[in-house]
Image: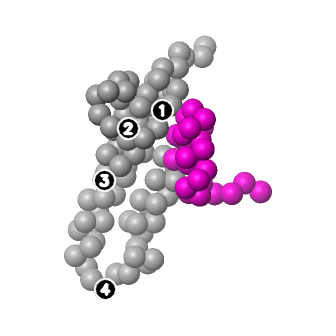
Amino acid sequence: MDEQKKTYYIDVGHGQISQSSTASTWSFKIQANDEEITQLRELFDQNYSTEWQNFFRAHVPYVQYHYDRENDAYDNTAQQVYGMIYQLGDEEAKSHIESMNILPKED
């Protein structure tokens, strides 16, 4: 059985998901069911945890950004977040994400 999709407003920078367009600022409008929102919330939570790891790692000056697993993990999860928003988003969201060139090119 296909779950009912609802409209959600997403602020990637703060990891916020809202059903109200006026509750806070938002960047993307998507249509998603409960399972998809749970997946997106888990990705935001994962990046929040990784941000803390990056904070502590930042105090180790000899590890360069491009050799840092935590930054790689954050980048990978951010790409997954934008991929989900692209799949679930309206045309404006899709167009904006395409202009960012953040998603891998399909062959």
Residue 83 counted in the magenta span: yes
In the rendered structure, which amino acid carries the disc numbered 4? Tyr
Which numbered marker is on residue 59? none
In the rendered structure, which amino acid carries the disc numbered 3? Ser
Q: CA distance from mark 3 to mark 2?
A: 22 Å
| Image quadrant in which you'd find residue 90 | top right
Residue nearest the viewer, comparing 107 with 22: 22
In the rendered structure, which amino acid carries the disc numbered 2? Trp
Which numbered marker is on residue 26? 2
Q: Nearer the viewer, mark 2 or mark 4?
A: 2
Callout 3: few (<14), some (14-19), or many (20+) C-alpha neighbours within 10 Å?
A: few
Q: Earlier in the sequence, mark 3 or mark 1?
A: 1
Q: Nearer the viewer, mark 3 or mark 2?
A: 2
- Residue that appears at 68% across and 57% down: 105
Q: Earlier in the sequence, mark 2 or mark 4?
A: 2
Could you say whether the residue bearing mark 1 is in a helix, strand or loop? strand
Range shown magenta? 82-107
Q: Are the residues at dot 1 and dot 4 in contact (C-beta closer than 8 Å)?
A: no
Query: Residue 86, percent across and down?
Result: 57, 41
| Image quadrant in which you'd find residue 87 | top right
Callout 1: few (<14), some (14-19), or many (20+) C-alpha neighbours within 10 Å?
A: many
Which numbered marker is on residue 29? 1
Which numbered marker is on residue 62? 4
Could you say whether the residue bearing mark 3 is in a helix, strand or loop? helix
The N terminus is located in which quarter?
Answer: top right
Per the image, the residue denoted by label 3 is 49
Residue 32 counted in the magenta span: no
Residue nearest the viewer, comparing 49 with 105: 105
